[in-house]
Structure formats: C-alpha cells, structure tokens
Amino acid sequence: MDLRELAVRQVRGVGPRKAEDLKALGIESAYDLLEYFPYRYEDYHIRDLAGVKDGEKITIEGTVYGVPLVQMYGRKKSRLACKVLVDQVVITAVWFNRHFIKDQLTSGTRIVLTGKWEQARLQITVSEHEFPDRGGASRTGTLQPVYSVAGPITQNWLRKAIRQVLAEYGQWVEEILPEELVARYRFISRREAFSLIHQPKDWEEGRKARRRIVYEELFLFQLKMQAFRALNRGKSDGIAHPVDSQAVKQFVRSLPFVLTDSQKTVVAEILQDLKQPYAMNRLLQGDVGSGKTVVAAVALFAVVKAGAQGALMVPTEILAEQHKRSLEKMFASYGIEVTLLTGSLTEKQRREALASIQMGLTDIVVGTHALIQEDVVFRRLGLVITDEQHRFGVNQRSILRRKGLNPDVLTMTATPIPRTLAITAFGDMDVSTLKELPKGRKPIKTYSVPHDMLERVLRFIRKEAAAGRQAYVICPLIEESDKLDVQNAIDVHAQLTYHFPDLSVGLLHGRMSNQEKEQVMAEFSDNRIQVLVSTTVVEVGVDVPNATLMVVYDAVRFGLSQLHQLRGRVGRGEHQSYCILIADPKNEVSRERLKVMTETNDGFEIARRDLEIRGPGDFFGTKQSGLPEFKVADLMSDYEILEYAREDAAKLVAQSEFWTAARYLPLRDYLQREQVFGGRPFD
Ligand code: ADP
Ligand code: MG
C-alpha cells in the first residue's frame, strides 16, 4: 500500500471537517500525518521532589491529604487548593478555574499531578492530573509528543489521530535507506523510527528515532543534489564564453587598486566557470567591505567582451544607482554600455531601456529584481549576478530557467554563513569566499554609549567633519510614533541641522521619492553633505569611502547582523573609522549583544555569538537566507550528521549500481518523485 496515495480521511476518526483542518497544516495523506513529527516531548515520568528546581514543570505522585478549599472570583474564576502528601512532604496543589474537580479530591485518593513547581511555597500549579486507581488510559510515566498545531486542531486530537494512523497503517512504512547504511550506523528500521519518534517509551528511544530520521532527511536532500549534478554534469546546455584572458588582465590592471589575493582566486574560479559549456551556479560570500563589487565587475567585463550581455540585480534602488555609477567609472574607456532599469524610470525612459536591451545596444543592465521577473527581453543574456542575495529570498535561477534562459549565475552575499555549512547545504552550488579585506584597512573602533552622552557624540561628529570626513546617523524610525519612544529621522535631522549650522546635514528615508533619494545619495557621495541622517535604507551595499563615522540611535532596536551591515558602511577607505552605538540596554541580552559589537569586527564571529545568545532556530532567518528547511534536522546542531550524509550520498551516486540495482529502487523512486530525472528539482 502506498501511504502517500491514501487520503487522510481514510484514517479512522478523521472526518471531512478535520481533513480540511489538517490540510491547513499541510497534511493531506496518511503518510503526511505519519511524517508530522513532534518538535519536542513533554515528560510525564514521575519525579522525586528532591532535586526539582524552582519553576520546573514536573509530574509527581501522592495522596490527597485533608479537605480541598475553593475560592470563587466572580462567576467563572476560581482557585482550588488542596494538600497532597508526596514522599512524606505535604505540599499544596492549586488548580485555577476548575473548582468542579473538588468532589473527586477525597482524602486518601492517589493522584498524579503535572504542573509548575514553586519551591518556596512547596506548591504545584496543576495543569493536568490523573487518578491512577481509576484505570483508563494514562499518560503517567510516558513522554508525550508535542506537535506544532494551529487552528481547530488541538494537541490532544492530533496525538490521538497519529496514534491511530500508526496503529492502522504503521506496518506499511517501508525502508528507504540501503541496508549497508542502516547496518553501518546501526540505525533502527524506518518503520520503528516512525513509531518511536511519536511514542517513545523514554528519552533513549526518542533519541534513537530522531538520529535515524535526521540522517535520512539530510541524506535524501544530499542525494537529490548530488544525483542532479551527476545527471547533468557535462551536459552542455550553458554558454561557453570565449573569454579573452588578455583583455581581462588588462582591465584588472586598469583598476585603481591591486586585487587582494582572495579576489584574484575568486576571479580565476569564476573565469574558469564562464569558459565551460555548462551553466555556472556559484555563491560568492565575503564580509562587508571585502570587495565583492569589483569581482562582479571583472566577471561582467569578461562576459561582455566575449559578446554576451550581463545583468546585475540588487535589492534597493539606491544600490542600483551606486553600482551603475561605479561600473560606468570602471568601464569608462572600454565602450561598455550600462543601463539602469528600476521602478523610478519614466515610461519613456523605460521603453528606451527595454528596446536597447532587446537590440543588444546595452551590454550591462543594473536594476532591482524587476529586472528578470518582468518581460525584459535580452538579446544574449550570458551572466546574471545578484548582489545581497539574502535580501531576495527567491531563487532567481529558477525564474530564469522558467523563462527558458540558462545564463551563468553568480550570487553574492555578506550574510555570514560558515563556509563549510554553505557548501554542504547548497549541495548544488559552488562556493567562493573572500577571506580578507583589502590591505590597509584599519579595524573600525566601536563604542556603546548611553543616551546622556549625546553631547560628546555630537562633538565627535563635528571633529570628524572638521577633518574632512563624513558621518551617518541612523534612526530606527522615519517619523515620530505615539507607540514607540525611539528616535526618528525627521526630528533628528531637524535637531542636527540646528546644532550644526555650518555643516550640511542631509536626510534619507524610504518614504522619499526615488529621485530625492538619488539626489541626497549623490550629494553625500560627493561630500556635499557631511552628515547623513538616515533610516536603514543605507543598510546594504552603500559605499562612500570618505565616511568614517557611523552613529546608530537606539541601537538595541537592531539585530546584530543589521548592526554589522550598518557598521560596514564605514571603514571602507584608508581613514580610521568609528561606530558609536547609542543605547540604554534594559536587559542582559541587549547588553550582551552590544558587547559583541564592541569586541569584534568579524561577521562570522558575530553570527556565531549571535547564535549563542539567541540559541539556534532563527540564526539564518532561514526563509530569507535561502537555506533549505528540514522537518527534524537542524543545520547547526546536526552539522556532523550532515557531513556524513553528504559523503555517503556522493559515494553512492558515483557507483554505477546505484542507477541499476534493485536494492536502490526506493531511492531512485524518491529521486523520481522529486523530479530529479526531469532535470528541474529545484524550481
Ligand atoms: P562589499 O564586499 O561590501 O560589496 P565593495 O565591493 O563595496 O564591498 O568594496 C568596498 C570598498 O573597497 C569599495 O570602496 C571598493 O572600491 C574598495 N576595494 C575593493 N577591492 C579593493 C582592493 N583590492 N583594494 C583596495 N580597495 C578595494
Ligand atoms: Mg556590496
């Protein structure tokens, strides 16, 4: 029986109404229900009172002692208290709003209580209780799975439904891993794992089931990636750009600086890819300020000189403008035509741009992501580069493929993903890393100061301006809010304009028109504005090397990676740069986070510390980062298993029996279901 084909309605106890509710959770087949794994367990094993910590949720057993006492508050609210004897200790059990159980609490009755323990008062606030002598189903002594539920589906209903589907159909769960792997890792069978992960007898069983399921999940993911690569390797459906190495070398020599060793290595990797007849799919990661733009420029240059067009996609209009300007500067003497394509073009400008792209008069298009989504027709699109990829959250490659294009793709990001993790997770991508900053950069000095030191901060801004430098002042809000007591850009701009009558103070925020934004950015770029008061619209990519001071108001309102990005706007030239975080942290976590900023400039280190402080889970902001999501596996904590899974998958697809032998049929079926053979598993 194929449980995937079996509608969830066929499970006893699931009616049409519940089937609809389950659908909202993504559960449609009996198999989906089996695969709806718990994310934690609730422990109903009976504990000794000794060793219980204050505030812990525990299950204890005792006997009712004395008479229960009920206090009513109004009609519905009540507090029921009753003494219970537990291991020679008299404790108080308290129920809220359930006074009706009073009658069952006769002295001497055995009772099991689950709830939150308060050490000082020897009191338990009961959330669940059972009477062990009255028979019936019992939770006591078990681990209960906790599922993510929503809407009309309750925890208890789902537990029952899953117990039911296991009982009815559990025996139809079939093994998918090859015997050799099951044996090597001493895994329990798939059938057993599915049963135990939902109903473990103890923690050990839960761990055994989880270990097996995590491996399987990561292994299948890797297998999909690797099989896809194996099948498509050598498939020459990409463009083999006839790169003119001499011309590229000459272009690199014409740049105002020497490439760093990292930049050289990465450029070589990319050029190599461009020459190959298959489509490049490469991730370029490098911390803020590591010089990704120039790498993009060299790649674009190579492609254009080889007769194709290039596209550079960025998340904001400000960045599009900036990239266009710097590309034009670099390409000035090469007759390369750069066109801007953003939402703020007039209808006429837009029509002209589109025509020029279609006719091939434009060599390079710089724009926001409308660039590849709308009906922009290229004459010969050879390379697409996405800057600040983590801001997009869409896979532009699949959009391109759907448009029937197959250009080389380079994705750039500063989101610090440890390199190994990136490679392993993006099994279908090659990864290049810029490991160093350009020479001569001085580490940015970061300080965290309270609001009442504002006077000194302002004196510091004046000092930098007097030395010919420029400053950013970042505010969390655009304008005053009645809900939040934080600084807003419009007020701060007014204050600073008043405070610095002799300086030019600019204002930038997301509600200004594109033209206004562009104007302000251009003036800041040319040092006609010395102090730029802005919201986080400048967070990514903005490059004004003469700016040396980044002041962030209400710094606790920003995430660590955001602060790191903002700080990355300075320290881009030869001058010593500073970052001042103004904040009065109210709790330990905020204090800790600001401390991290003052202690390190390293994006990877910041990501690591952030993870420590926050705990795993939203480290990557998984949805945004484009990293795959798993049902049970956690990329961070299950990293080691991921490594094994990757290796095993690679070995397997390299064997010719994998593609023919009967024992691998379940895996090939899986690949079939995932459309790996159709060639587009990642669309
Ligand atoms: P990011 O990686 O954050 O996008 P950019 O590409 O904007 O960094 O580069 C940051 C600054 O460093 C820019 O002003 C750029 O011109 C400069 N830069 C890039 N590469 C080098 C280099 N090899 N030597 C000196 N300066 C460089
Ligand atoms: Mg950049």
Image (cartoon, rainbow, N blue to C red):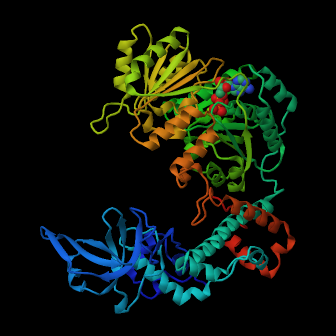
Task: Please state the horizontal and vertical placement of residue 508, each as a whole percent of the image.
Answer: 44, 26
How many numbered discs, if any? 0
- Above or below, 287 relative to 65: above
Residue nearest the observer in this picture, 506 or 520: 506
Regarding residue 361, the answer to whether it shows in the image is no
Relative side of 592 to 443, left or right: left
| Residue found 76% across the figure and 33% down from its top | 263
Q: Is residue 473 left or right of residue 674?
A: left
Depth check: 325 or 446 in front? 446
Indicate whether 325 appears above or below 105. Answer: above
| Percent of width and height locating residue 482 | 27, 36
Q: Nearer the viewer, residue 573 or 346?
A: 573
Question: On the image, which quarter does residue 275 sit in?
Answer: top right
Residue at 83% from the left image edge and 24% from the top image edge: 250
Residue in the image at 45% along x and 40% along y: 590
At which x and y percent is residue 98?
Answer: 23, 75
**Which quadrant: the C terminus?**
bottom right
Which of the pair 624/641 is nearer the observer? 641
Considering every residue shown, the one lying at the far front of the view is 88
Query: Which image quarter is the N terminus in?
Result: bottom right
Q: State the residue at coordinates (78%, 53%).
A: 237
Ligand 1 in which quarter? top right
* Residue 308 appears in view: yes
Whole-percent x, y for residue 428 in the image: 72, 55
